[in-house]
Image (tube, helix red, strand yellow):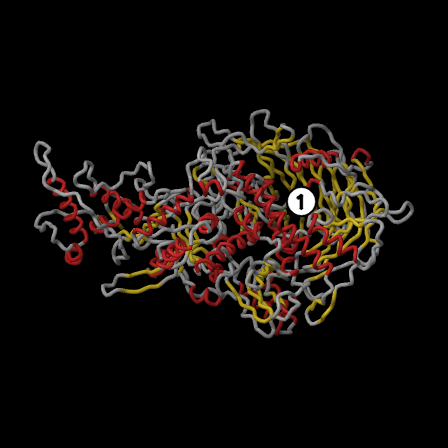
Amino acid sequence: MFDGFSYKGEPVKPRSYAGMAWPNENTDLQSLRQAKGVQEVAAMAAAAMFLLSLTIYLQGGLWLSVESKYIAYNTSGRIVPGKINVHLVPHSHDDVGWLKTVDQYYFGGNNSIRGACVQNVIDSVMSALFEDKNRKFIYVEMAFFQRWWRQQSEAMKIKVKDLVNSGQLEFISLSLDLTDDGFIIFLFLGTRNGGMCMHDEATPHYIDLIDQTTLGHKYIKDEFGQLPRVGWQIDPFGHSAVQAYLLGAELGFDSLFFARIDYQDRAKRLKEKNLEVVWRGSKSLGSTSQIFTGIFPRHYDPPDGFTFEINDVSPPIQDDVLLFDYNVQERVNAFVAAALAQANVTRTNHIMWLMGTDFRYQYANSWFRQMDKFIHYVNQDGRVNALYSTPSIYTDVKYAADEEWPLKTEDFFPYADHPNAYWTGYFTSRPSFKGYVRMMSGYYLVARQLEFFKGRNTSGPNTDALADALAIAQHHDAVSGTERQHVAADYALRLSIGYKEAEKLVASSLASLAESTSNIRQGNAVTSFQQEPKWFEDLLMHVWFYRVSLVASCPLLNISYCPPSEADLSDGKSLVVVVYNPLGWKREEVIRIPVSTEKVMVRDSSGGEIESQLLPISNATLHIRRKYVKAYLGESPHEALKYWLAFSASLPPLGFNTYIVSGAKQKGPSSTISLVQTSNESTNETIEVGQGSLKLLYSAYEGKLSHYLNSRSLVTSTAGQSYSYYTGNDGTDKDPQASGAYVFRPNSTLPIKPQYQVPLTVMRGPLLDEVHQQLNSWISQVTRVYKGKEHAEVEFTIGPIPVDDGIGKEITTQITTTIKSNRTFYTDSNGRDFIKRVRDSRTDWELQVNQPIAGNYYPVNLGIYVQDNSTELSVLVDRSVGGSSLVDGQIELMLHRRLLHDDSRGVGEVLNETVCVLDRCEGLTIQGKFFLRIDQLGEGAKWRRTFGQEIYSPVLLAFSEQDGSNEINFPLPTFSGIDPSYALPNNVAVITLQELDNGKVLLRLAHLYELCGGSALHSASCFIRMLYYNNAEFLFLVGMLCEKTGEDKDYSVMASVELKKIFPKEIFKVTELSLSANQERTDMEKRRLVWKVEGSTGEESKVVRGGPVDPARLVVELAPMEIRTFYVDFDHLQMFGT
């Protein structure tokens, strides 16, 4: 540790001046450095400065004849071997929305909140960089830079590109050379991060992270021809394993840097000099996807005393001898002291100083002037070496040091910055917005698929606005829920605008696909659409002009509002329902739409009647519908809604089917009206719910879930579900930390019990059973058990959370079983890998437990599960929430938060969301879903992965009304974008299918399963041996090996996808790319830095990935957890329609 001026225990300070020759104006300081020891030179320099200060005064205050003249600061610092090298990295961290909206931050609006103008930052930085070619600056947020760039003249753009190509501005590509004197010169071109924003790492889905990064990388490649190689996640509130391997190594990054880790973790790492590590985030991909990671010893700002924005209090260097307060040596000493302090907790002789923080450099010269001086005088002093640098330069010198680095696995959640401040509340904050982002993410995936099938039209509607809005929404103060209310509204507005534009694209694509009479090549077979009737073409095309008859979806369907489905079906009218499946495998789905009549029937595309069921609308649903339709649309719904209509849809992969809902004749076939029963009417103590394999048992007296039974899997388990709330700490005790948008600090836990005995209402029918429960005036739920499914769906409605008592509340639900989980549970990382959690424990240090509830909460994007030696309980979610297992056998999810105090983390506003109707405001009511299932041990992964993909990619519904004067001619249009005889393997998903402006098709395939232990080699070799050996006994042994090492014994193996059967057109060329599609994969791998790991014996099992794609066979292999990205070129891109 730093003790005076010492480094590695050795003093670094001037020696005695006796016997030394004083330097003068003719002294060659460089030759002195070579002839004398560094410490001697430093002492001589200090003495010279002291003598100079004495000679500028005469007794009586008279001046000597000294001159104040221009000083040419030497800023050409470079790496000096053998010295401590201080890498000064100028930067400004510019939030893409937080206290102000993204546009307000850009142009400097709403400065009463904060005086921040990013436009000024970039303007000022450019001017400063033009002044001195040695200066550098790094910048992350492409959403801001893109705004600035499009406002510049062509002359300015040329000058900025020169800055990029010279390595001054952000963009880096390595060129390494050694000079004659052994000094290393680096020339860099490239960028850091490169996404549209610095995304959050707890609450986004991994597909959103890929999409926003791809968008930013494409912009950089198109405008500057550059490739990012450093990750820069300095501000997110904890860091995910997916960030390390997927949004790091798989992008071709060589390093990743960030600031925020748990205060206990940081203290241990500082003590052990373990702030820089090799992070191996994926146990499935192992060392093939690891990344060098640097954690800053403090925040992402400079050491104390070295911030130089206008009005900052740090003392600048005053080096004019004619002015008072001359302080060069004083400031140099402070610089050296701070450098040595950091060097003593950092490996190698290189340290990084982040010269900037939030929205700095609005007057860039105030920073650069001081850094120029420090580089000049510190290097003259000679004790340490200072230089302008970038994270890429820093990465390369760390790599060149040939050091062995500590190995880090798993993630950096949860994050706490002091004992009572766990940043785990934001996992749930603004749950409605989190749900909206997730819904728009799935819609964006569908829209790109349909645009591809139709053929991209640059002049028509497109997905660009939705892509931009979704990218910005991934910002670490956006989907996180930590922004101010008016900023959250701005994000939502942008998503809404993007959705409306994409909706036009989706409707026109469906219309084009349905009306097309062109032949479509399906694999090796050539088929054509059924000749569709003229009425269908007319109705589908009607949306293009009026957006009335056909809509791509009903965006308010979650509150039971869908005008097309609620239309009067009398007089022979019918409702056409097009159901699109964005998944690569066949799908059976129960469709639920609101209808206003009970005499209806449903027919499939061939005209045959299919089974359907009517479920009465509850009073709670009608109340939500009336209130929120009025809030969103400004008018009340007109139709008298009576029922939910449910029917089964059988859907092809990447395709749609068409259904007709029509009024039933008086004596003809009709939908089955659900049998409604209350618990008061039951003569049994137990009420059984479920028509298929799954049965839920409820206590008729208590109205609570008691047992879970599955006749197929033979699972029998006691089970319960309840609600409770935490009272938010108001920060008035000894520690003034309150619960707020970021921080979860509970005061106490209170169960939520029914305020009065309300009977269960059970609705039974041929397709599903529902259990309606009203816990109190502000919490209700509907539990659904589908005949053909083996999980329970719980739809909850919570709000307005009452705060009349002056107490904020954080609402949770608990699913309780008798599973002996031994303090252990598993949560996903951004919807991808599952990570083992142990209550009150951390992998990297001995945890001091201060907050036993908040400190055990983790982000949940896909799901959470617990298990023992026989059974596992899994719960999946429809949006990001916080979750934990605070009691063995129990899973807890936080579903909603309403608080009355700010947590003092900068947002300066309480998390108290309200909705206003007719000038009356009340707390926000949210509606969402979670899904639960109990399996035999080892069987739950199949459901978690398969159904988890269905949650992320729900079916898309399109509607049209058919006038009774036109007869419906069957069969109706159906469509599948792939060979009708083919479906993707059950362990593979298409996560991107998109036609680009350059005519290429971007394809991403993701393996959905991981390895639970060992390396991918085990599962891959298991797969290979099963192909080539026939010995039954050996196959059994190999199968056991797979079961032990894989997440699933059937699916944690190599998978294959036949591209010829996915694309119905002749493929000309397939090129594999990096994850963000900005470079060829082979080039990326050639450039990858291979880092040494402490304790590594070099005997790690080789990780097997999918092999190269044979241009003749066109089969893609995917190893567990592997995502592969391709450009697919066709001879003729327009495959469907004209």
The image quadrant that residue 987 belongs to is: bottom right
Q: Nearer the viewer, residue 278 or 394?
A: 394
Quadrant of the drawing holding the N terminus:
top left
Give the x, y percent position of residue 931.
Answer: 66, 46
Left-right relation of 321 to 273: left
| Mark 1 lies on residue | 555
Q: Which residue is situated farthest in the right direction here?
A: 667
Q: Is residue 1008 visible?
A: no
Give the x, y percent position of residue 694.
Answer: 74, 49
Q: Is residue 1121 visible?
A: yes
The image quadrant that residue 846 belongs to is: top left
Q: Nearer the viewer, residue 231 or 426?
A: 231
Give the x, y percent position of residue 400.
Answer: 34, 61
- Marks counted in the figure total 1
Residue at figure coordinates x 54%, y 58% from the top left: 1013
Left-right relation of 108 to 911: left
Residue at figure coordinates x 40%, y 43% from the top left: 120
Residue density around tag 1, few if under 14, some if 14–19, many if 20 or more, within 10 Å: some
Q: Which residue is situated farthest in the top direction here?
A: 805
Give the x, y percent position of residue 603.
Answer: 82, 53
Q: Nearer the viewer, residue 1099 or 666?
A: 666
For label 1, the SS is loop
Quadrant of the drawing holding the C terminus:
bottom right
Q: Nearer the viewer, residue 669 or 563?
A: 563
Left-right relation of 273 to 1100: left
Q: Amino acid at mark 1?
A: Pro
